Amino acid sequence: MGEPYNPKVIEARWKDFWWEKGFFKADINDTSRKFYYLNMFPYPSAKPHVGHGRNYILGDAITRYLIMRGYNVLNPMGWDAFGLPAENQAIRSGVHPRDWTMRNIAEFKRQFRDWGVVFDWDREIATCEPEYYKWTQWIFLKLYERGLAYRAEAEVNYCPTCETVLANEQAVGGRCERCNTPVEKKTLTQWFFRITAYAEELLRDLDTLDWPEHVKTMQRNWIGRSEGANVVFRSELGDEIVVFTTRPDTLWGATFMVLAPEHPLVEKLTAPEKRAEVEEYRKLAARRTEVERLSTEREKTGVFIGAYAINPVNGERIPIWIADYVLMTYGTGAIMAVPAHDERDFQFALKYGIPVIPVIAPPGGVAKSYVMAGTFEQGLPGALREAGFTFEEKEGSLYVSFPEADRGRYVELVREYLRPGSWTEVIGAGWQFVFPDAVMDVGSLEEERAVLEKCKALEPRVEGARTVAEMLWRVEFYRDLLFHAEYGEMINSGPLTGTPGDIAVKRTTEWLEARGIGKFAVNYRLRDWLISRQRYWGAPIPIVYCDKCGTVPVPEEDLPVLLPEVKEIGLKGLSGIEEFVHTTCPKCGGPARRETDTMDTFVDSSWYYLRYISPHDDDKPFDSELVNAWLPVDLYVGGVEHAILHLLYSRFITKALRDMGYLSFGEPFARLFTQGMITYPAYWCPEHRWVPPKEVVDGKYCPHCHRELEVSVVAMSKSKLNVVSPDELIEKYGADTERLYTLFMGPPEKEIEWSEEGLRGAWRFLNRFWELLTTWIPRVKEVGGDFDPAALPPAERELWAKFNETIRKVTREFESRRFGFNVAIAGIMEFTNSLEEYLNRGEPNLALLKRIVRNLVLLISPFTPFIAEELWSRLGEEGAVLEQGWPAYDEEAVKLLSVEIPVQINGKVRARVRLPHDVAGDADALREAVLKAEEVKRYLEGKELVKAIAVPGRLVSLVVK
RNA sequence: GCCGGGGUGGCGGAAUUGGCAGACGCGCUGGACUCAGGAUCCAGUGGGGCAUAAACCCCGUGUGGGUUCGAAUCCCACCCCCGGCACCA
């Protein structure tokens, strides 16, 4: 019998062993077998939970494997240590953010140690240490020198709860990412990094990265490149108004123009009688929060400013409006509005009575005509039918649909039957109005007006309509043809009429360029990165303002600009600390004021992977030569939540540093793996707020009021009280069990729910594993000598083959891009089951068993290092597990085995034939052997064999009649 | 709306990428041990048919069609779910 498994004793023995032995210290000067493995460093908030564990346990397993493969692994860890929670906590409790942060860091390190997760701790960094943020400031200065850091007055997102400015990316859906408060607008002078200068490259280089497709897609969407043209409109007074459009082919349909309320020309262009109204609207727009503004439900609003612009392609005079659906921050802050082919413009035009002129033929090539009851003579339906037109007749009205090609015929025909004073329309590729005495197009503003007037004169019921479009909109039958955003043949477009849809954009752009009124242009959704934060706990921006010299960067030798030591952290951040603000100008020595903004913490984390290479270098941020040798990071692992911000910023900083000559590469992370979160039920009581799962009564009732609780399975978070602490689990089951279960629960990429039952499955397995191995280790320990696999009897052969199959399976998962350790561990479990069965059968082959036990221990070691190290030492082997090579897979082993070949007859598996490996491996021999086999013959009797397909090593498929 | 990723037992998920669907684990059912067990061990477990039993048969990977000797896997159409973005001109 083996002894009982006691993880507490075992784990205590090895906890510090791996670090002390130096297995996790990278040899930074040897890059011949280098592997830079990197976990995203954590923000050290309070205590880590099992959800944090997923990331680090995964990484630890991978690095242990790599070490055994003989790689010189760099696997560092550090702390994203600046940030809001520390500061908010400080304001509340008076504990200095540094002390709070350091306590948490200690807690994280203790947890890692308990987990058996080891890093190269000699390279530990914390972004809040002066020796680190000195270089964050240095990077700022370098960007400033290059014009990539600049100060600008900008309308910014401001969170009234956090009392700070937020980056666009932190204002998620118009709400503060941290506290969910609706974001307000404020105009402030702020620091920006010019990430847009790299928009094109950031987009293009995504193609070179071995990253999950969805992450690349998210970045592509975020950068949001679109091609089109800038077109120069002019106001009636001659002011240039440039608009960006992706649809220059719709230019002839521009019936109005919209400027963003903040557009600089608004001031000048507004007519005196409109000024009050315009001013009011601008104020309203400025006050509106992002949420309101972004709400898709909201109806579009705007104001006519009393001025007109001239459409350069056709000289049409079109009204200029302002509306907040046009953003100052995208394109030129002004658009040409083409209501016939843009949904927003269409809504706007309909609401404010602005004409619509179709200029692109709709897809489908179908035209429609509605002939109202009472407007036509008796014979029309019959005549239509006779002429081959199909239509529906409802309450005396006709609803006719026909191919565009029949338009002429239809118009001729219907005209004959129209009663005097009536008309009908043909709506399709262009809108036509058919009167008994005339046919009129709606192809220009002038024609539109003429049609409208004529209709009004004939029919008092359309009196209220302000435009033709409004009139037509009343006819349900036409609605799907009044507006569309597809590409199609250009119509009503002067010299370009008739241009096919597939070349319309290109030809129009060329046409505009030839006339000097427009130019091909590219626009990005990406905005510059706003890095200013009005806070204390961050890296101060190293800038001084001098009355004489202006904006002066702090000289490099004066870095770091230290955070002032203060007793109490106030709400005003650095600006509230007088001693800090007042300084002398580095240029003239006169009195000056310091910049009091600190940098966004994403700046800290946008370059930390470079610092790990020489973490304690006082002379420079990093050693270019070593960094160029070690980077890009071979494998970067972290949560998807950083798919846009952190990764995009890091890529930008890398490219900027490369262009300054400090780096030889332009992408920091060659390969990325994103692991999913661990979820757990969170219980909500309307009265008693969040209830910890353990206190829930009968799985659903509040322990205080017995009300039924609302359950949601969500990512573990302290605030929702649904975290599972590793401490209790490790106390009860040991770290190996937590590790094993964490890796076994499912593919690491996916989000998954934590389950203590599942954890107990891992616990049971480790107990069996331990007992089995400790039972036999004393015996195999004494055995010497080897064995010849080819000479093994069948049962042993099979075991040996199966074991090698297991090695292959486990190895494959480490080498794959999915790290499916759930499958690898399942393989180990499966093999352990077989081994147990074999050992229960009788006296085993001890030489074989020894080989298997040794390698099995090595095989499981990346997942459960404690138990592996303990068993390894009990085997009496030299050295530690991490000093052993990774078990090799013996391909020959499987070949010793006979193979069971399924035989399909007409697509159904009807028999199985056991054959030697070499027979099964050869198509001809296999086919022959199977056809001769007794169990197959009975299916062939009296039948004709039509086809026999043999797949070597797999199966045989027979077709019979 | 646009983009991306998916639909396999009661659940998490396997399936060597076109070759025995459901590995491994959880849960469940039955049994053992026990004063007891939410501990542990053993057996069974996709659905259905037949049934003393072994065996055997049919159905089955979101739906419908197609390609193929053979489809969870490839193609076409549709339905549903998850994630991201969303007044970006």
Image: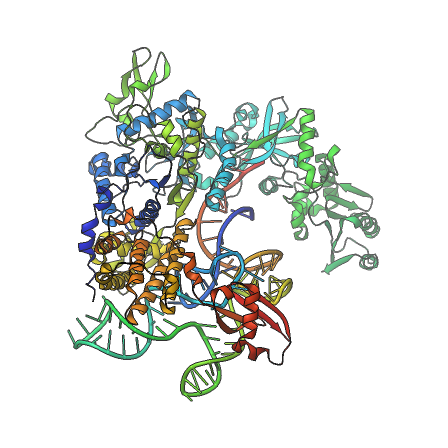
Frontmost residue, A695 versus A689: A695
Counting from the top left corner in percent of width and height, residue A836 is at 30, 67
Frontmost residue, A666 versus A72: A72
Q: Is the C terminus of chain A in the top left, top right, bottom left or bottom right quadrant?
A: bottom right
Report the coloring of the rendering: rainbow
Left or right of A227 in this view: A217: left
Which residue sits at x=75%, y=39%? Answer: A498
- Would you say residue A683 is visible in this rendering? no
- Location of residue A806 (image quadrant): bottom left
Counting from the top left corner in percent of width and height, residue A518 is at 64, 27
Does A599 appear above or below A697? Answer: above
- Location of residue A950 (image quadrant): bottom right
Q: Is the N terminus of chain A in the top left, top right, bottom left or bottom right quadrant?
A: bottom left
Left or right of B5 in this view: A564: left
Does B5 appear above or below A88? Answer: below
Does A846 appear above or below A579? Answer: below
Counting from the top left corner in percent of width and height, residue A81 is at 28, 36
Frontmost residue, B53 versus A244: B53
Counting from the top left corner in percent of width and height, residue A858 is at 30, 53
Left or right of A270 in this view: A795: left
- Location of residue A842 (image quadrant): bottom left
- Report the label total: 0
- Would you say residue A615 is visible in this rendering? yes
